[in-house]
Amino acid sequence: MAGETAQPVMTMPARKASRVQPTGRQCVRFLFAKLDPAWYGLPETERNAGLRELSGILEGFATGESTILRMFDLTGTRGDADMMFWCVASDLDDLYTFVHAIRRSLPGRYLSFPYSYFSMTKRSTYVENHVHEGQEGTSDRLVIHPMNRKYLFVYPFVKTREWYRLPQDERQRQMDEHIAMGHKYPSVKINTTYSFGLDDQEFVVAFESDSVADFLDLVHEMRASEASAFTIRDTPSFTCQRVELDGLLGLFA
């Protein structure tokens, strides 16, 4: 790319420590994108300049004081989405700024977003005694700590209204069974976030693992739990492979 005309690089604005919410709760967005094949018809120099622009935007968000970004490739598992951005921020405005910057960039003009889920971190009422190392419940549960495993399995989740009408101790009993099943698969870490009133689903669950087979077996076993009978929707389901920045930009090559 040497000798090409220099293009302005859009970067995210500097973040101030005062913007971090004292409660520690985070806003989370799972943004799935599909690349228009028309992108490949652009001149190579134009595409390269666009990727430098996009790289600056992604690096800016990934290195923010109160933001987290993980990027994923779905080309091997989905036909309707090519990539996914797992975006976490303490300030919702950061998510707006980030997505606006992507959409204004040259590559962003060739992206559509067939799926998007918005949620927040929140304390679970079921995991106070949940002490399985690396699983939900061992931290303050208000902050996401990605394990950087090879795969992320994501789906929206909705339960029946009857579930919420059950006594708390009955829901806890059923969730204890559910959690015990999860303990049998220590290679799978769950990240549960909450969407009540914020988006169409009630939860978004994201499981990190290095083993596709372990996750499949876990979900299969959980189908038999009592609590699963109160599920309305847990689709679409996405199998995402984690990539670094170079890998994400390679999807545009």
Image (spheres, rainbow, N blue to C red):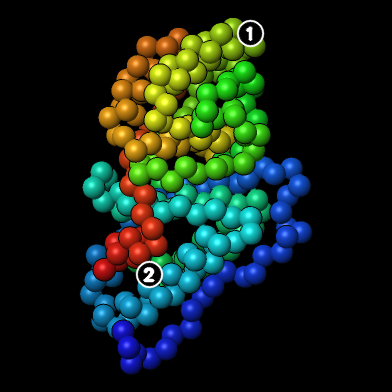
Instruction: Inspect the image, locate mark 1, and give the three-letter code of the amino acid beneath it.
Output: Asp
Foreground pick, 197 / 98 = 98
Q: Which image quadrant: the N terminus?
A: bottom left
Tell me which corner region of the image, top left, top right, bottom left or bottom right, holds residue 189: top left
CB-based contact (under 8 Å), mark 2 and mark 1: no
Residue 158: x, y in percent? 49, 27
Give the SS element for disc 2: helix
- Label 2 or label 1, whichever lies nearer to me, is 1
On screen, residue 62 versus residue 73, left or right, reads: right
Q: Residue 107 got which mark?
A: 2
Q: Earlier in the sequence, mark 2 or mark 1?
A: 2
Residue 122, given in percent of the width and then of the height, sits at: 64, 34
Q: Which disc number belongs to residue 85?
A: none
Q: Specify few, some or many for label 2: CA neighbours under 10 Å numbering under 14, 14-19, or 20 or more.
A: many
Left or right: residue 1 versus residue 155 is left
Taking 63 as reference, is 37 left or right? Answer: left
Query: Looking at this view, is 108 or 191 the one in front?
Result: 191
Q: 241 or 193: which is nearer to us?
A: 241
What residue is shown with label 1?
169
Q: What residue type is labelled 2?
A: Pro
Q: Which residue is drawn at 62% across and 26% down?
A: 124
Residue 38 percent across, percent down from the top left: 25, 69
Residue 105 can be seen in this image = no
Q: Which residue is drawn at 34% across and 38% down?
A: 210
Which image quarter is the C terminus in? bottom left
Q: How many numbered discs, if any?
A: 2
Q: Which residue is drawn at 29% across and 64% down?
A: 250
Tell me if residue 97 can be seen.
yes
**Residue most extreme to the front:** 133
Q: Residue at left 73%, top 49%?
A: 21
How crowded pointer 1 is (Cα within 10 Å; few <14, some 14-19, many 20+) is rated as few
Say if 251 sits above or below 142 in the image.
Answer: below
